[in-house]
Image (tube, grey):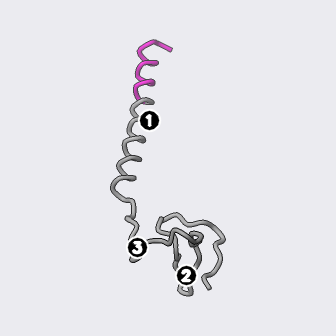
Amino acid sequence: MKLSDLAKGSSVLLGVIVAGYVSTTYVDQRFTMPIKTSAPAPTNGPAPSACVGEDGSWKNWPWPNVPALSPKCR
């Protein structure tokens, strides 16, 4: 292996790492869902846990990734 081949491979690897980091931060900034609440959460009680509603939608979970095996809402 020549030194020029090593330099080309290293620069490609570095370029892929930088592109992955930049795209991740761009997606995190542009496509995060804002948390919309009508009333502030009570500070004296326990926080509500995620649950599945009657229609199959998630309740009390503002993020797109949801915990697996969450209980049904009461």
Label 1: element kind: helix
Is 21 placed left or right of 66 in the picture?
Answer: left
Is residue 31 or residue 72 the one in the foreground?
72
Is 46 situated above or below 22?
A: below
Tell me, for residue 39, which label it has, or none.
none
What amino acid type should be assigned to the residue bearing mark 2? Answer: Gly
Q: Find numbered disc 3 in the image and state the secondary structure of the residue it sits on.
A: loop
Q: Earlier in the sequence, mark 1 or mark 3?
A: 1
What distance separates the C-alpha of mark 1 from that of mark 2? 38 Å
Q: Residues within 10 Å of mark 2 (few under 14, many from 20)?
A: few
**Which label sits in the foreground, 3 or 2?**
3
Picture residue at 48% right of the left edge, 65% below the top: 64
SS at badge 2: loop
Q: Quadrant of residue 5?
A: top left
The disc placed on residue 56 is 2
Q: Residue at x 40, y 67 (%)?
A: 35
Q: Nearer the viewer, mark 1 or mark 2?
A: 2
Q: CA distance from mark 1 to mark 3?
A: 37 Å
Q: Position of residue 34 (x, y in %)?
A: 37, 65
Give the residue at mark 3.
37
Which residue sits furthest top? Answer: 3
Whether residue 29 sits left or right of residue 66 in the image: it is left
The amino acid sitting under disc 1 is: Ile
Q: Quadrant of residue 46?
A: bottom right
Q: Are marks 1 and 2 in contact (CB under 8 Å)?
A: no
First to last magenta residue range: 1-12
Query: Magenta stretch: residue 51 in it?
Result: no
Along the line of sight, the residue nearer the viewer: 25 or 34: 34
Q: CA distance from mark 3 to mark 2?
A: 20 Å
Which disc number belongs to residue 17?
1
* In this rendering, position of residue 13 left or right of residue 31: right
